[in-house]
Image (cartoon, rainbow, N blue to C red):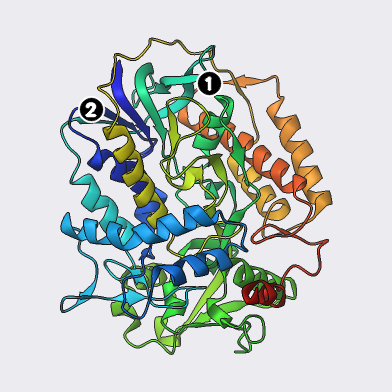
Amino acid sequence: MNTDILIIGSGIAALQLATKLDSQYNVTIITKGKINDSNSYLAQGGVAAAIDQSDDVLSHAFDTLKAGEYYNLPSVVKYITKMAPRVVHELIDQGMTFDQIGHKLILGKEGAHQHRRIVHAGGDATGKHLTESLTNQLSEQVTIYENSFVYELLMDHIQQKCCGAAFVDAKGKKQLVHAKYTVLATGGCGALYQYTSNHPMALGDGVVLAQQAGAKISDLEFIQFHPTLLYMNSNTYGLISEAVRGEGATLINQNGIPIMEGVHPFKDLAPRHIVAQTIYNHRLKGDEIYLSIKQINQFQNRFPSISQLCTKYSIDLHDGLIPVTPGAHFMIGGVETDIKGETNVQNLYCIGEVANTRLHGANRLASNSLLEGLVMGHELASHLNKQPKAQKPEPIAPSSNLTIPKLPNLKHLQKSMMKNVGIVRRREQLTIQLNWLQSSLQSKLQTNLDLESFNNFIAYQMAYLITQSALKRHDSLGCHQMAEDVSSINTTESREYVEQV
């Protein structure tokens, strides 16, 4: 089959792109689950934008740089934070309803933000409302293949050009789709870890597919762990949004002692890697950690989704304590791109979490992820809409029949990644993990190409790339923390000098 623009994935970045493309284009979306099976749909937080009169774009940019440990690309930070208010107002004009009091947007505050600048919807269901709003705007020119997975990008290796993809459809049939432009919007890889806020199918498909096609990847060692996932009986059951701490909740141990006192000037709203590492250190000492919500009036009205989650798992909110632990949340690195998602491979674009624009640096500022996806979708649509009418795509065949090695089950991988490539890392454990992954991927036993075996294959390859990147960075930076670098956990003092300069 032929299409003008192929979009792989169905999160915020993909939907924003699809809704803004000109009607001249035939667009095909391929997604592993249903159209709304994505991390974007699960997002509780919101979209960061300097909208309030007391706020400004420079402050938003500064907070982004500071949270990212100044490893960010300043030009990208400046552009995306500048675009943020415009993107929010465009969404409203298109019919998106953000939470308001009267005609004024309610602005939330999250970690490492100096101002209230987070717009949200449904209290703590922003991702759900955003994805549904954009999905409802898709035109008849968009064809959607659900429950289908791409296993190879079709490449013209002579011209180093992407020409579409090979995929398995919902009936298990192999198909080829030839495209003038191919866009990876596959999201992140948090489901590689035992504890995660991510959708179970967020395994890093886009990075692996792009790397196999010759695209440059970078910064995969930076995996952000969200500090507060609901934690019971050694399992996690979903995200407790940072917005809860923004409204006054505090992290305490089993004795009621606040754990963020004296760690960072922002205390419970410190950058995520500092909060996650602090909880990790307390757990090593045998502490249990709770989020105290006693200070928040009408918690169930402000956070209805989180309240339902807690009730589902028999947490009595009247006690005012929610048991929490950190879990894998966001892939900061990825496929190297500019703001419009252009890669080093001709006609291949990556947008959203799969892309590495260097917006986030070494640690993502809260609620900049939906923002990045929205801006990149907007920018790529503007770029493609200026291109001449697409010619008929070239009929390129797959390089070969993909063979899948028989691998240990995914749960085994998830536990080992949490232990060996988690919040705080050690060179010895990273080396053990890399050798085990390499040995597993070299298995001579083969298995069938179905969704389960493919997910396993992608997961092991992505885990290998992350572990390899983590071993290459010897120093601690942001959310890549090496235990051997004992001075790295509290970075406050070292950054004060940079700020003065």
Determine which quarter of the picture holds residue 370.
bottom left
The picture places residue 252, in percent across and down from the top left corner, at 59, 84
Tag in front: 1 or 2: 2
Quadrant containing the C terminus in the rendered view:
bottom right
Label 1 sits on a secondary structure element that is loop
Quadrant containing the N terminus in the rendered view:
top left
Residue 487 is labelled as: none
| Residue at horizontal 42 percent and vertical 26 percent from the top | 347
Distance from the alpha carbon under mark 1 to that under mark 2: 35 Å
Report the label total: 2
Label 2 sits on a secondary structure element that is loop
In terms of sequence position, does the residue under pointer 1 or pointer 2 come before the other?
Answer: 2
- State whether residue 169 appears in this view: yes
Q: Amino acid at mark 2?
A: Tyr
- Name the residue that disc number 1 marks: 448
Residue 25 is labelled as: 2
| Residue at horizontal 35 percent and vertical 60 percent from the top | 84
The picture places residue 466, in percent across and down from the top left corner, at 66, 43
| Relative to 211, residue 96 above or below | below
- State whether residue 409 appears in this view: no
The picture places residue 274, in percent across and down from the top left corner, at 63, 70
| Relative to 259, residue 459 above or below | above
Taking the image as shown, residue 90 lies to the left or right of residue 365, namely: left
| Relative to 490, residue 218 above or below | above
| Residue at horizontal 51 percent and vertical 36 percent from the top | 205
The picture places residue 362, in percent across and down from the top left corner, at 61, 57
Determine which quarter of the picture holds residue 261.
bottom right
Taking the image as shown, residue 433 lies to the left or right of residue 240, namely: right
Judging depth in this view, the residue of 484 and 158 nearest the camera is: 158
Q: Amino acid at mark 1?
A: Asn
Local crowd size for mark 2, using a 10 Å CA cut-off: few (<14), some (14–19), many (≥20)? some
